[in-house]
Image (cartoon, rainbow, N blue to C red):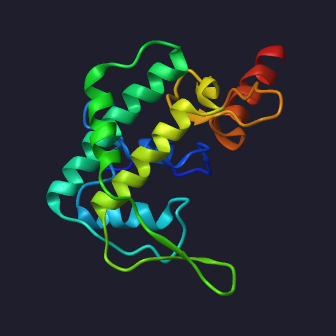
Amino acid sequence: MTYGLPFPFDPGALCLELLPTGGSVRYPQFESLHNPADLRAWAAESRLGPGLEITVEERELAAAHALRAALWSLAGARARETAFAPEPLAVVNTAAAAPPLTSRLLPDGTRAWSAGATASALLSTVARDAIDLFTGPYADRIRVCGADSCALLFVDTSRAGRRRWCSMERCGNRNKVRTHRARK
């Protein structure tokens, strides 16, 4: 069952790109990681870029669901400026402890991914990105979309630091239309 239409959305960090794939607890209706092939497809469409071919086992798919739930918790806590819960921290730290994906620089200046990549390495890379985000210069710029019907999280990298919407093309435009109609 499909809910809504896809729309352009750049959350600003690899770790936050995993969140719109759903969530068994918070957003089961949006679940898109049903099988190992779905996780492979997400990786190929992520900011990691083309050429990433990973193997995914069922246990790694379960680990991806657990990491996603932990990231929902931690990113939400950071956006609300509250303390992190210990369980999600443990999930992220455990995932980050595994060896990450390995990239190579090619003679033409492009990146390629080393062969033999696993979903565990992918999840380690995502978890390490989360640690960098939550401890880095944009840690206080993690936001929840300002729309009443949207809970997407993103990093506000705007110069002024006042971004309110996950996407101007979707939530921002809907708010502008609503405001315009209210004025008339």
At 41% from the left and 60% from the top, the residue drawn is 42
Total residue callouts: 0
In the image, 179 versus 131, the foreground residue is 131
Q: From what the image shows, is residue 15 above or below residue 123?
A: above
Q: Position of residue 50 (x, y in %)?
A: 52, 74
Q: In which quarter of the image is residue 65?
A: top left
Q: Which residue lies furthest to the bottom in this view?
A: 107
Whether residue 27 appears in this view of the structure is no
At 47% from the left and 29% from the top, the residue drawn is 75
Q: Residue furthest top?
A: 82
Q: For this view, does 40 lie left or right of residue 107?
A: left
Q: For this view, does 62 lie left or right of residue 164?
A: left
Q: In which quarter of the image is residue 36?
A: bottom left
Q: From what the image shows, is residue 27 above or below residue 103?
A: above
Q: For this view, does 130 lie left or right of residue 121?
A: right
Q: Quadrant of residue 59?
A: bottom left
In the image, 45 versus 63, the foreground residue is 63
At 40% from the left and 45% from the top, the residue drawn is 127
In the image, 28 versus 141, the foreground residue is 141
Question: Which quarter of the rendered picture does the C terminus lie within?
Answer: top right
Q: Position of residue 66 (x, y in %)?
A: 25, 40
Q: From what the image shows, is residue 82 above or below residue 64?
A: above
Q: From what the image shows, is residue 81 above or below residue 27?
A: above
At 24% from the left and 66% from the top, the residue drawn is 56
Q: Residue furthest left?
A: 59
Whether residue 168 appears in this view of the structure is yes
Q: Position of residue 107 (x, y in %)?
A: 65, 87
Q: Position of residue 28 (x, y in %)?
A: 29, 38
